[in-house]
Amino acid sequence: MRLISIARLRSFWESHAGSDSEGSLRAWHTHVNNRKVEWQSWGDVKADFASASIVGSCVVFNIGGNKFRLITRILYASQKVFILKVMTHAEYDEEKWKSECGCLETPPAKKKNVYRTATNGNATKKRVRKKHGK
């Protein structure tokens, strides 16, 4: 999987020095960032992290023996994990993160590909990306 971005993890463990978050977050990062990890579905995530949860469009990981929460969005097709927010368990319980991370919002519609036949008589098709609203 490809992680985007470790900067949020680093920022959290630097601002919470002495909380043992660095080791736990680095261990999670090392595991998920391994080229051999190729999650294709929620079942694959759950097999690696039994305590992970789905909240809307987000996946929430319990880190450091449930002391910390890591909010992510996983795009299985492109093998990307977006790190949205890292917080303490107490901050997680306030539930502000749900709106901050957009976990419960409807995802934007996918862009449609439109295929057109060439007007010069050729049987080839040209791929054109249709813009939203047009």
Image (spheres, grey):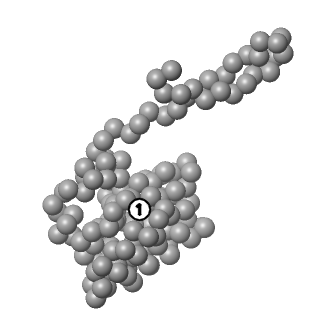
Residue 101's spot in the image, x, y percent? 31, 53
Residue 57's spot in the image, x, y percent? 36, 47
Q: Residue at 39% of width from left, 68% of height from top?
A: 8
Residue 20's spot in the image, x, y percent? 31, 85
Query: For the residue marked with disc 1, what is the amino acid?
Result: Ile
State the quadrant of the N terminus.
bottom right
The part of the image, by quadrant, that contains residue 92 is bottom left
Crowding at dot 1, Cα within 10 Å, few <14 / some 14-19 / many 20+, comes out as: many
Q: Residue at 35% of width from left, 81% of height from top?
A: 14
Residue at mark 1: 83
The part of the image, by quadrant, that contains residue 122 is top right
Q: Is residue 118 above or below residue 76?
A: above
Residue 103 in the figure: left or right of residue 74: left
Q: Residue at 30% of width from left, 41% of height from top?
A: 105
- 9 and 34: which is toward the camera: 9
Q: Is residue 8 above or below residue 58?
A: below
Q: Is residue 40 above or below residue 62?
A: above
Residue 106's spot in the image, x, y percent? 34, 38
Secondary structure beneath dot 1 equals strand
Q: Please indicate, yes or no, whether residue 43 appears anywhere in the rendered image.
A: no
Q: Is residue 22 above or below residue 98?
A: below
Residue 17 in the figure: left or right of residue 114: left
Tally the numbered discs.
1
Residue 121 in the figure: left or right of residue 22: right
Q: Residue at 50% of width from left, 64% of height from top?
A: 3
The part of the image, by quadrant, that contains residue 68 is bottom left
Residue 81 in the figure: left or right of residue 125: left
Q: Please indicate, yes or no, whether residue 28 appears anywhere in the rendered image.
A: yes
